[in-house]
Image: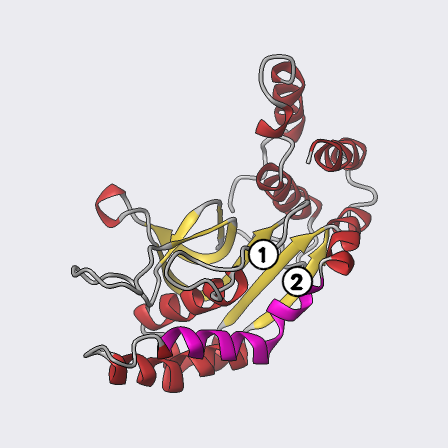
Amino acid sequence: MDDKSYDLNKLFEFFKYWKDYTHSTEFYNEGWLLKLLVYAITDFGLKEHPLYVNENEKFFSEGLLPSPFLTEGKKNPFAESHTHADGAIGNFTIGNNSSKGLLELKGNKLNIFEAKINSGFSTGVTNASFYNQAARNVACIAETIDKADKLENLDSLSIGFYLVVPKDQYEKKKSFEEFLDRDHILKTVKKRVDQYKNEGDYVERKDWFDTKFTLVLKHLERKPLFYEDVITELKGSVYIKKIKDFYNSCIEYN
């Protein structure tokens, strides 16, 4: 992110103006909160923080991650569409309309963020009720890395999947910790692959799971980031009070 000159106060003024003309949740939500924290962490220079974006990286919201379970041009009862990432930081490009805005890894870093305020991970997709949002994101990260031909360089990659969430919600919703667990993700994605046992491409899919997905999962950092901790780390930032107020409004309206 090479432009740090943007004045975040302009965005807060925009929110303040529009709050009387639209629903508060149009901007007091996890999407905007994540964007604000990414900018604030970067502006404040917290270079070791997962939300920091250096001059050679980019941040993108709602980018599409390729799924390993696409239709591939034919109707399939188990297929799904691409996955939207609340946030991505790293070395990548975002495709145009012809490529459906897909994220393509170009360098050695890809961190994916799923932001929540008062909701949990979605528990499944239409064709697989057990295939929760955490497992789906991790499978899509593995597919993204595979498509970029980076599997042989996993040791040199910085890859992560982060849940950004209020601490009390994480403690209240036990499924957060459960769904982030490595063994749970492994079993869930294996079950997803095994749906294809009677399909002609099952051997290929099982090979993807055994030789690609499991390697990515082994290298992938998976952890929660609590909003309260992130905001505490911003102590001293010129934006700290407004960020606290914005966060409190997000909690109030969601």
User: Which of the image's four quarters has the C terminus?
Assistant: top right
Residue type at tag 1: Phe
The front one of 164 and 5 is 164
Magenta-highlighted residues:
174-193
**Horizontal arrangement in the rendering, residue 164 relative to residue 191 (left or right):** right
Counting residues from the N terminus, which is met first, the one under dot 1 or under dot 2?
1
- The circle drawn on residue 189 is none
Q: Secondary structure at mark 1?
A: loop
Residue highlighted by disc 1: 121
The front one of 37 and 56 is 37
**Residue 70 point in image, percent of width and height:** 28, 62
* Quadrant hosting residue 150: bottom left
The front one of 2 and 22 is 22
How is the structure coloured here?
secondary structure
Residue at the limit of the structure toward the left, as seen here: 74
Residue drawn at point x = 51 percent, y = 63 percent: 132
Residue highlighted by disc 2: 176
**Horizontal arrangement in the rendering, residue 222 relative to residue 194 (left or right):** right
Q: Residues within 10 Å of mark 2 (few under 14, many from 20)?
A: some
Q: Is residue 228 above or below residue 202?
A: above
The front one of 156 and 101 is 101
Residue drawn at point x = 68 percent, y = 45 percent: 118
Residue 187 part of the magenta segment: yes
Q: CA distance from mark 1 to mark 2?
A: 7 Å
